[in-house]
Amino acid sequence: MDIIKYLEAHAVEKISENEFIVDNPTEFVNIISDSDYYIQKMIWWDHIGIKNQKQSLGGGGPIDSKDNGFMYSEIYYISKNFSANENELCRKYLLEIPKKHTEHQLIPSFSVKRKNA
């Protein structure tokens, strides 16, 4: 599958030029594993009401473009870098982190890079 077309259809938020929050993170990780790209970094965000920002695990970030009463608060200390051959580690990390912080609505974003670039 063409990653650019996938992101056009499934990106919920575009954080930066090559960093996205997608509607189905597990599907995205599986699809990108079979492409010419890899997940260079997974960044976790606490999706939280702006009024409750002080209770967030994170430290600021963009307002939710679909609901301006919410924001994505970046959680620096649980973000992780990956190399092109760490697809399984990336999948495992995607499943593990939310289980450790069940009291928060954690959402990953993905920074992608072309393999051998």
Image (cartoon, grey):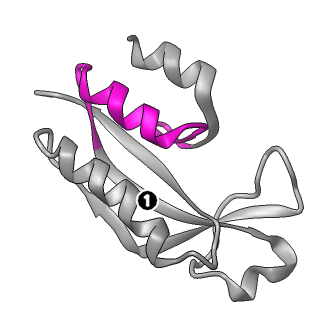
Name the residue carrying label 1: 43
Q: Is residue 104 magenta?
A: no
Up-down relation of residue 8 to residue 62 (above or below): above
Q: Is residue 22 magenta?
A: yes
Residue 12 vs residue 38: left or right?
A: right
Name the quarter where the C terminus is drawn.
Answer: top left
State the image quarter where residue 12 is shown.
top right
Q: Amino acid at mark 1?
A: Ile
Q: Residue at x 38, y 73 (%)?
A: 78
Q: Residue at x 20, y 53 (%)?
A: 89
State the image quarter where residue 26 is shown.
top left
Question: Magenta residues?
Answer: 15-39
Up-down relation of residue 14 to residue 52 (above or below): above
What is the x, y in percent for residue 83?
Answer: 15, 47
Q: Residue at x 79, y 46 (%)?
A: 65
Residue 15 vs residue 89: left or right?
A: right
What is the x, y in percent for residue 34?
Answer: 24, 21
Residue farthest to the bottom, as pictured: 54
| Label 1 residue SS | strand
What is the x, y in percent for residue 102?
Answer: 57, 75
Name the quarter where the N terminus is drawn.
Answer: top left
What is the x, y in percent for residue 68?
Answer: 87, 56
Q: Residues within 10 Å of mark 1 (few under 14, many from 20)?
A: many
Up-down relation of residue 1 to residue 98 (above or below): above
- From the viewer's side, name the closer residue of 59 and 32: 32
Q: Residue at x 57, y 82 (%)?
A: 57
